[in-house]
Amino acid sequence: MKIFKKLKNKATKKLEKSFNKFFIKYIEENNYNIYKTCLSNCQMSILSKVYKPYSVYDSSIGDYTYIASNSTISFTEIGKFCSIGPNLLCGYGIHPTNGISTSPSFYSDKMQNGISFSNKCKIEERKKIVIGNDVFIGMNVSILDGVNIGDGAIIGAGAVVVKDIEPYAIYGGVPAKDIASIIKQLKNYSKYNGGTGKMRN
């Protein structure tokens, strides 16, 4: 029995070693990185923090805002002091629902799927998203193109935001709906452009 156990352990170690070699080779050949990041055409404050991995392009991020890992953000303006949970999907293009097909082959010349039957873009495929200051966004939230989110708003985990959200409103659900409102008087307190000294007082 002892010999059998030794042989079994030896075989297991060999198998693990072979698998590790194969796995590393696969990663290298496919240029795959589990901590992959993409940052293109962005204005990101040096006082902000975005956790890896992330994909952020054509966007701006304000002072003291942090964004948790695994976020995909494009065509978005994010204000100051925002707290954003993991797995945010913010802006991913528009598909028309009133044509013969929702496939971009019929309305776009960008050839997203490798082919196009259209010689021009027939719709506005991207619209800017604006997220105000001091906005809290929970995990696994999706925000559609063209949405504006006001200062101080709260968006619950798992929400799909399809329309504008008023300042200091609390939204949640699919699609996201108004749940409650934070004290309206806070709207008159502009702390974001006065520097940190004003907030300490």
Image (cartoon, rainbow, N blue to C red):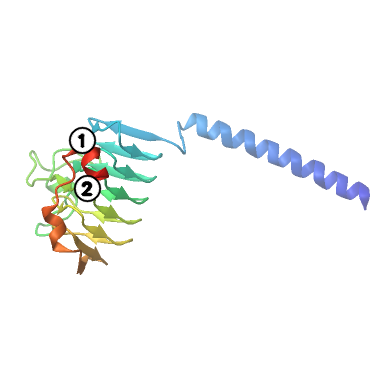
User: Dividing the picture into quarters, in which one does residue 18 lie?
Assistant: top right
Along the line of sight, the residue nearer the viewer: 155 or 13: 155
Q: Is residue 160 above or below residue 4?
A: below
Q: Kindly indicate whether the residue at mark 2 contacts the one at mark 1 (C-beta within 8 angstroms).
A: no
Residue ID for mark 1 = 58
The residue type indicated by label 2 comes to: Gly
Q: Is residue 137 above or below residue 46?
A: below
Q: Is residue 178 visible?
A: no
Q: Is residue 24 above or below residue 76?
A: above
Neighbour tally class for label 1: few under 14, some 14-19, many 20 plus, Cα within 10 Å: some
Of the residues under marks 1 and 2, which one precedes in the sequence? 1
Residue ID for mark 2 = 91
| Residue at 53% from the left image edge and 34% from the top image edge | 26
Q: Quadrant of the C terminus?
A: top left
User: Dividing the picture into quarters, in which one does residue 120 lie?
Assistant: top left
Residue 140 marker: none
| Residue at 20% from the left image edge and 54% from the top image edge | 152
Q: Is residue 7 left or right of residue 59?
A: right
The Cα–Cα distance between marks 1 and 2, rounded to whole angstroms, is 11 Å
Q: Is residue 68 left or right of residue 188?
A: right
Q: Is residue 18 above or below residue 186?
A: above
Label 2: element kind:
loop
- Percent across and percent down for residue 21 are 63, 33
Along the line of sight, the residue nearer the viewer: 142 or 22: 142
| Residue at 25% from the left image edge and 48% from the top image edge | 90
- Percent across and percent down for residue 154 are 25, 59
Q: Residue furthest bottom?
A: 179
Label 1: element kind:
loop
User: Dividing the picture into quarters, in which one does residue 7 lie?
Assistant: top right
The residue type indicated by label 1 comes to: Asp
